Image (spheres, rainbow, N blue to C red):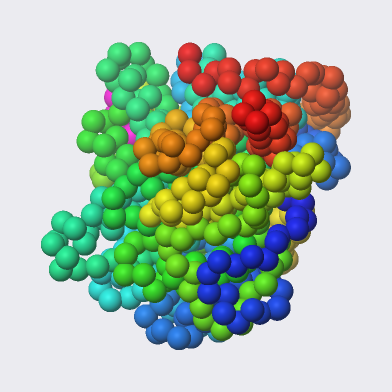
Amino acid sequence: MKKEMKCSCSVLKKLYITMLRIRLCEESFVEPILNREIRCPVHLYSGEEAIAAGVCGALGKRDYIFGSHRSHGHYLAKGGCMRELVAEIYGKETGCSGGRGGSMHLISVDKGVMGTTPIVAGTIALALGASLASSIRKDNRVTVSFFGDGATGEGVLYECLNFASLKKLPIIFVCENNLYSTHMPIEEIRATKEIYKIGRPFGMKSFRVDGNDVVKVYEKAESVVRAARRGEGPVFIEALTYRFRGHVGPDDNVQGTHSDIRPKAEIEKWLKKDPVKKFEAFLKKHNVLKTSDMDIIKGKIEEEVKEAHDLARKSPYPGEGELLRYVTK
Amino acid sequence: MPGKVHIPERENFCDMSRSSRKLQYSLAINEALRQMMEADDSVFLIGQGVKSPWYVGKTADGLLEKFGENRVIDTPVSENAMTGAAVGAAIAGMRSIVVHPRLDFMFYAFDPIINEAANWHYMFGGKSQVPVVVWGIVNRGGEQAAQHSQAIHAVFAHIPGLKVVMPSTPYDAKGLMISAIKDDNPVIYIDDRWLYDIEGNVPEGIYEVPIGKGRIRRNGSDITLVSISYMVEECLKAADELSKEGIRAEIVDLRTAKPLDKEIILNSVSKTGRMIVVDGGWSFCGLAAEILAMVSESGFDSLKTPVVRLTVPECPAPSSRMLEAKYFEMSGHIFNAVKDMVSRSR
Ligand SMILES: Cc1ncc(C[n+]2csc(CCOP(=O)(O)OP(=O)(O)O)c2C)c(N)n1
Ligand SMILES: [Mg+2]
């Protein structure tokens, strides 16, 4: 309890708002995906909100993040504009990537969202490079690299762990372990379950946190970000979690194949650990927010989400004459 | 997705059985894999998604059940190591097939493919060989954008030591997979999800389609359309429309990007005097550029008019639907380019 109270009320409220914005925004895509208004591949983050909220909550505006195919949450938590996110997913000119990238290619340079891309592990080395830039410039920034458990299969991750440790770079590697990499349960792709230990052979401080507990994620992130900023070098965090939706789309069967092989009982077990509900109970218990406060917050966010969709729907597609724009600067 | 097009059944090569059994393209690949694994214990399949139709369609149906996890191996997301392992197993005497459910994911595997497999036989003076099939699936469209849409057959074709096959029919899909598996060299086998549901005649037994031999898919005397893989479908569509205007297009389906069947191209061009190359890759330094260069070197005297290439635009694939439709639009461009060329050079 004492530990939990390390966070101030205002921090807790902010974390709650961030998580709820992600959840409500994510769930708002379900219907337009099902009615084919949205057609790009969308990897929903529902169920994993505590990680993005907790980690990005510990970062400053100037800090950098890089992400993957499942990065709506990272983008929003770091301050990316919801209207531009939604418009991007509709493929509109007003989207954060001008409609060129869709759900898997998010960016908000001003907010430190440096880019999210769907090649598994593709941005880990880029995050390493951003932290290298910070160390060369001594600009006091910290970079976070978000990736999934699947990315632990790619050799580039280990190359980055070594170099980050060698050069004491200000980078936090955050592995969101949701126990699956598309159709593969983690036992089928990893010889050992403890992902967090992979940082240790490189002399890196490595932790596992409950990724469905935003307070725990925030506290851990806050302390390691501070240490990284002091020049103490990189940290590896494994956050255990579970996605509530299919690998891509609301459920994997949308594409006509039954590739969601996750056992029903397992899904139900994790639904009970819903990070949003869990945090709501915590906030009430500690008198941070009352149900009526939460309803007000929810109402506001619902409005924001609805407006984002309305605006996206009304926005133009990029003009056909613009196909070759942006190939080079 | 491709429309159902009429495919004139004019086999130039070894459809000995004259089979009338119909099979889908994806199931033709499946059959090739199953029969080759049955026939040869050294054949095995490794790669991401061999357990999941989401990744490989129906191409791996039933293989795991039949041959077990020892020979049908779904993998971690480790393209570099898994491809290297396929190459190494081939060096150690296996016939490996490594699948990549998108060509884009294969970029991590360039080192074992290009530095090692392609050079291996040469740099060891012929002392060792690499009978590996590196199977990459083009799975583009659906607003997936830049990193899920790249067709890079020309990159592989650029590399000495690699063969690159790209079937467009179920018949060729099976026969080329068999030839690729039997070949003692690294073969890049590229197929396209847009072809997976197409049906065609496929003989039931094991047969080979020779690597390096194209095929005339449609006879014509006015113009030669040279194409490969899914773009042959677009050519067939355009040719149907063109025939309504009295223009008879001959369609050369290369089937293999490398080694290139120069003869079939030059023969056709000597008949028609006109050529348009249609390719699903990019224009600059691409497959179409190579064919244009070859024809200007070896078939210049046959030409009535400058050759033309049609490719996807020189940019990454965009997500946004109208831009994406424009990016992949092809049969209309073929129709217009042919009409233009024929009318200018009557
Ligand atoms: C290099 C590469 N290989 C394969 C894929 C196909 N793919 C897309 S997502 C994914 C699994 C990702 O699993 P994980 O990293 O655990 O993230 P999650 O989807 O669980 O959030 C794979 C293999 C890819 N995008 N990039
Ligand atoms: Mg995962």
Magenta: main secondary structure equals loop
Is A28 left or right of A232, judged from the image as shown?
A: right
Residue A94 rendering spot, x and y as whole percentages: 71, 17
Is residue B146 or residue A53 the one in the foreground? B146
Q: Is residue B20 visible?
A: yes
Report the residue at 32% width, 47% height from top: B159
Numbered range of the magenta stretch:
A230-235
Residue A264 point in image, percent of width and height: 73, 66
The total of numbered circles placed on residues is 0
Q: Quadrant of residue A24?
A: top right
Q: Is residue A86 left or right of residue A134?
A: right
User: Is residue A242 depicted above or below A286 in this figure?
Assistant: below
Corner quadrant of residue B341: top right
A230 left or right, relative to A24: left
Residue at position x 58%, y 21% from top?
A324
Q: In the image shown, does B163 or B273 lie closer to the viewer?
A: B273
Q: Residue at x 67, y 72 (%)?
A: B201
Say if residue B57 shows up in the picture.
Answer: no
Q: Is residue A319 above or below residue B173?
A: above
Q: Is residue B175 left or right of residue B320?
A: left
Position in image of residue A54 (x %, y %): 57, 33
| A310 in magenta | no
A101 w.r.t. A182: above or below: above
